[in-house]
């Protein structure tokens, strides 16, 4: 449900640009992506699960922000990341960030080195787990004194909710649409032969 009443002083028009990266890589016969568990020392979203990323710096293109922040947070060199494209920006009223999600890939699972002031732990999730409907759950939570039904992804006991879950949901939708289109084209090709 809309949360504007919870954070009335943060508006879309005063939002702070930020960017995150869904970094895809092949691993164990699947495509995986990284998620980080944030430390309690960071300013925003303490202890939450998120995609690598952070605030935009002047002079950068937003996809460059996502790639730079990925290098700073988890140690994947910028030059190893192949930029694919973007998803829909997501506004977080609680912190005032307009998060711009981007997609990138590496040809193999990259070596990582986490920035321990920002990242408590790093893990990766297969696309098959994201697409699996059993990983999407809903719980009753109390947030800032308000009762809410919160959807989240449960990846092996790690709860991914909020902006990160919304971004992953759009990515999941795109993947399912692509898979459906691939099946349709395959069926059409087989019927012609």
Image (tube, helix red, strand yellow):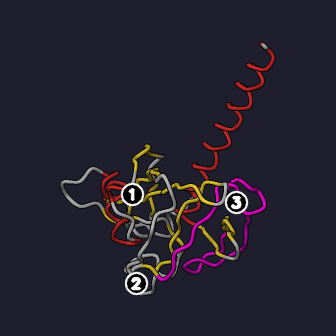
Helix, strand, or loop for circle 2?
loop
Q: Where is residue 156 in the image (x, y as percent from the top left)?
A: 70, 73
Give left or right: position of 125 versus 98: right
Give left or right: position of 68 versus 91: left
**Badge 3: few (under 14), some or many (20 or more) residues near its Cα, within 10 Å?**
some
Give whichever of 93, 125 is nearer the camera: 125
**Badge 2: few (under 14), some or many (20 or more) residues near its Cα, within 10 Å?**
few
* Callouts 3 and 2 close, C-beta under 8 Å: no
Marks 3/2: CA distance?
Answer: 27 Å
Q: Position of residue 114 (x, y in %)?
A: 42, 77
3 or 2: tag closer to the N-terminus: 2
Give whichever of 22, 25 is nearer the camera: 25
Label number found at residue 98: 1
- Please identify the residue farthest to the bottom as the structure is shown: 41
Marks 1/2: CA distance?
Answer: 25 Å
**Badge 1: few (under 14), some or many (20 or more) residues near its Cα, within 10 Å?**
many
Helix, strand, or loop for circle 3?
helix
Q: Give the range drawn in magenta.
A: 120-148
Main SS class of the magenta portion in the image: strand
| Quarter of the N terminus within the rendering | bottom right
Count of picture labels: 3
Q: Where is residue 55 in the image (x, y as percent from the top left)?
A: 32, 64
- Write down the quadrant of residue 80 in the picture: bottom left
3 or 1: tag closer to the N-terminus: 1
Indicate whether residue 146 is drawn in magenta. Answer: yes
| Quarter of the C terminus within the rendering | top right
Marks 3/1: CA distance?
Answer: 27 Å
Name the front one of labels 3 and 1.
3
Label number found at residue 116: 2
1 or 2: tag closer to the N-terminus: 1
Name the front one of labels 1 and 2.
2
Q: Mark 3 points at which residue?
A: 129
């Amino acid at each position: 449900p809309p949360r504007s009443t919870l954070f009335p002083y943060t508006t879309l028009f005063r939002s702070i640009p930020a960017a995150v990266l869904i970094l895809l890589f092949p691993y164990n016969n699947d495509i995986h992506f990284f998620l980080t568990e944030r430390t309690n020392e960071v300013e925003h979203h303490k202890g939450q699960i998120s995609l690598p990323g952070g605030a935009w710096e002047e002079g950068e293109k937003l996809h460059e922000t996502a790639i730079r922040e990925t290098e700073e947070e988890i140690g994947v060199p910028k030059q190893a990341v192949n930029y694919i494209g973007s998803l829909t920006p997501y506004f977080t009223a609680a912190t005032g960030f307009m998060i711009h999600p981007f997609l990138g890939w590496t040809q193999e699972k990259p070596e990582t080195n986490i920035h321990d002031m920002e990242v408590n732990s790093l893990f990766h999730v297969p696309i098959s787990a994201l697409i699996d409907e059993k990983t999407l759950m809903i719980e009753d939570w109390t947030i800032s004194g308000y009762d809410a039904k919160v959807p989240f992804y449960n990846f092996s006991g790690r709860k991914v909710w909020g902006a990160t879950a919304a971004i992953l949901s759009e990515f999941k939708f795109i993947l399912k649409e692509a898979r459906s289109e691939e099946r349709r084209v395959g069926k059409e090709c087989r019927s012609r032969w």
